[in-house]
Image (cartoon, grey):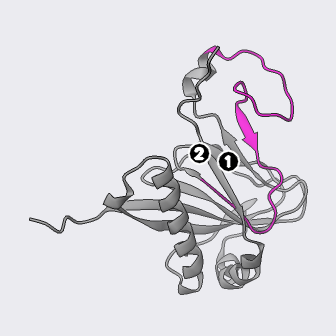
Amino acid sequence: MDCYAHFPSLVYRVEKPDWVKQTLEATQKYYSNAQNNSPIAQTEQMANDPALKFLGEYLSASAYEILRQQGYDMQKYEIYVAGLWGQDITNQGGTNVHVHKNSQMCGWFFLETTEGGAYPIYQDTRMNKQMVELDYVQGQELTNASSQVHFNDVVPGTILLSNSWVPHQLVQNRVEAQAKALHFTICHREKLCSTY
């Protein structure tokens, strides 16, 4: 029987370990000012920091190309990093499942990780599947029955990108060591028409 995979939910991954030191240095002032009275501290917005321009340009260019490859008419749009903030995840810290409205793509750049620490989980986007879900075989392989994917192998320098409508979370940090990541959103704006 023929089989067709329609409406995929894609997560993109690239490793940039050479950027970790520079990024940690540029973001340290934000992490120092973050309120650390909860298991997950979030920094102020840092998308417009000149020291992080290299990262913003890379993320914007990557998102543009991903969206183009997905079939969007990118000649009509400009892409930019609208949100960029640090997350400092301590013992028992994590996030609930969420999506990012008013943006096209989102993701993380991991700066510090440890075994047993917080890592991302992406949830199934097929919401109607949950209404008729069968028990499925638990295993290492992802199948059509899988309802989530665990990225429990992120390391300093891992960048993950997905469409903003893909539900995601940071699983709870189960160790004393902190995990640090930059979470970001990438938005679009229409290019102005130059002919009247």
Q: Provide the residue designation for mark 2.
A: 98
| 146 versus 182 height, above or below | above
Q: Where, quadrant-wise, is the C terminus in this rendering?
A: bottom left
- The region drawn magenta spans 132-161
Marks 1/2 in contact by CB < 8 Å: the verdict is yes
Q: Quadrant of residue 195?
A: bottom left
Q: Most prominent secondary structure in the magenta stretch?
A: loop
Who comes first in sequence, dot 1 or dot 2?
A: 2
Q: Provide the residue designation for mark 1.
A: 169
Dot label at residue 130: none
Q: CA distance from mark 1 to mark 2?
A: 6 Å
Q: Amino acid at mark 1?
A: Gln
Name the element at disc 1: strand
Q: Where, quadrant-wise, is the N terminus in this rendering?
A: top right
Name the element at disc 2: loop
Q: Choose between 108 and 14: the one closer to the eye.
A: 14
Mark 1 Cα within 10 Å, few/some/many (few <14, many 20+)? Answer: some
